Amino acid sequence: MSGNTQKTPVSEGLRLDKFLKVSRLIKRRSVANDACDTDHVLLNGKPAKPGAKLKVGDIITLRFGEKLTDVEVLSLSEHALKQDAQNMYRVIGQD
């Protein structure tokens, strides 16, 4: 049995809404969808659709109220344990 059951790498891009949920940047996928639909999420500086495909190195900007947070995508995974989720991204700026 493999010891790496908590992370399933993705080679062809992961949906933005799924990444936001798996990485625990946003708690629920439905909330991630709503955030994208209301322009609270930018992908590489442009408004993002929930189904946008991510790749490593993309920059996601999240707006929570008046606060902006920029994160860089470090890895893509279909599943991640809570302790591994924060390793999927790096915070690069907060306003």
Image (cartoon, helix red, strand yellow):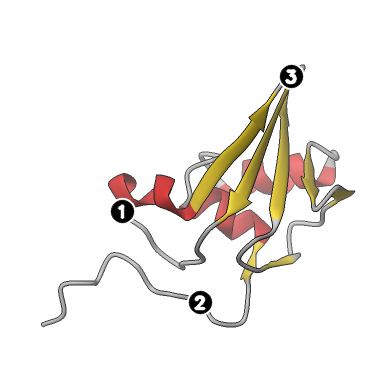
The answer to which of marks 1 and 2 sits earlier in the sequence is 2
Q: Is residue 54 shown left or right of residue 3?
A: right
Furthest residue to the front? 92
Alpha-carbon neighbours of circle 2 within 10 Å: few (<14), some, or many (≥20)? few
Furthest residue to the top? 66
Please name the residue shown 62% across and 38% down the image.
Answer: 92
The answer to which of marks 2 and 3 sits earlier in the sequence is 2
Residue 41: image tag: none
Residue 10: image tag: 2
Alpha-carbon neighbours of circle 3 within 10 Å: few (<14), some, or many (≥20)? few
- 51, above or below 8, in the image: above
Q: Position of residue 19 (x, y in %)?
A: 57, 57
Q: Which residue is mark 1?
A: 81
Q: Which residue is mark 3?
A: 65
Q: CA distance from mark 3 to mark 1?
A: 28 Å
Contact (CB < 8 A) between labels 2 and 3?
no
Q: CA distance from mark 1 to mark 2?
A: 16 Å
Furthest residue to the left? 1
